[in-house]
Amino acid sequence: MQIMTAAAMPKRSIIFAIAWLALASGCARLPGPGVTSITPKTLSELREYVLDHKADVDQFRLRGPFEVVTHKDHKLRLSATESIDTDLYLSAPAEKAPLVVLLHGHENSKEDHAYQALHLATWGIHSLAVQLPNKGPWVGNGRTLARIVALIQRRPEIVDSRIDVNKIIIVGHSFGGAAAAIALAEGAPAAGAILLDPSGIGKAMPKFLRRINKPVMLLGADEQVSRMRDRGLFYELIRSGIAEVSIRDASHEDAQFPLEPASQGPGTDSPATEELQITFVSALTSAALSLAFTGNFDYAWASFGDAIKNGKFFDALKK
């Protein structure tokens, strides 16, 4: 067996090896472009700082100020006979904090949102990445997601007693975005939803979208790069409280962010790039903090202002 010394290992491999060792020990610091210089000791101090300074999505490209404890393959029991696998990322502050529930898309998994969940937790938002059947049925997954949120709202201690049950946010990618919208339509007691380049699921979708009465943020890929089926229906049919923006040059896969880097280069399957994945996660973080801190997406929309002006974000819509 060949043993590779640290000196011989590529720098990128060392970074990810350290990340996974940290995960295994239950306490992780993220790989990535650096840590914010903001140093609040509590979530309340972070909220005050964020809302008192210029809204700027780029500040959320950096890791947040809080440590994270990770519980991989945490069993969430929905009933005496039904449980689901989840990965749980708990932020350090002792006070009650928001919770984001993330759902993967078609033929994907909870691991595909590991970096996003960890990143959110460094910014004071507990995160729960759930594993549901990854080939659907997506209406069924949406209803299961609504049950998960309702259960956590009634019994937050099944995840963590520090969860603020009035600030649960649903996030979904691709068909998981459709499931997140369906969960809201089915009455999930969530503050709202953030949809990561969502795809419609056919004829059933319009009836659900018309029933949504909670705030929704749609963060889309560049449709010149990746065009999702019926993505336009979300903005068209949700009656109010929806905002949408696309990220220049981003692919559908950039709306995910596994801890393991995507394969890149000639002959590889994934067009995802770390730069655009970080852009997605910064927009996701701004949107989640906006909804958690203010109950709407106005702060996030303001934070997108410079990126919209310089063309990094485009096709911005809000109603």
Image (cartoon, helix red, strand yellow):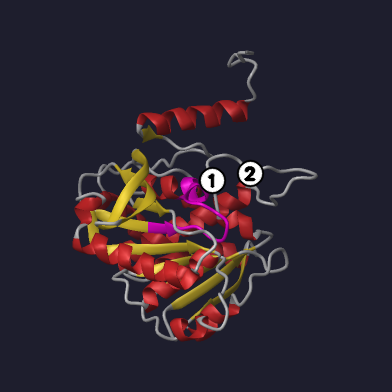
Q: Is residue 53 visible?
A: no
As drawn, 168 above or below 18: below
Give the left or right position of residue 228, taking residue 198 as reference: right
Q: Residue placed at 66% from the left, 62% from the top?
A: 248
Q: CA distance from mark 1 to mark 2?
A: 8 Å
User: Which residues fall within the magenta stretch?
Assistant: 101-116
Reading the image, the residue beneath label 1 is 258
Reading the image, the residue beneath label 2 is 262
As drawn, 92 above or below 242: above
Which amino acid type is marked by label 1? Pro
As drawn, 91 above or below 51: above
Q: Residue placed at 56% from the left, 75% from the top?
A: 200
Residue 186, x across and y down, in percent: 36, 77
Tag 1 and tag 2, C-beta contact below 8 Å: yes
Q: Is residue 104 magenta?
A: yes
Tag 1 secondary structure: loop
Give the left or right position of residue 20, taking residue 255 as reference: left
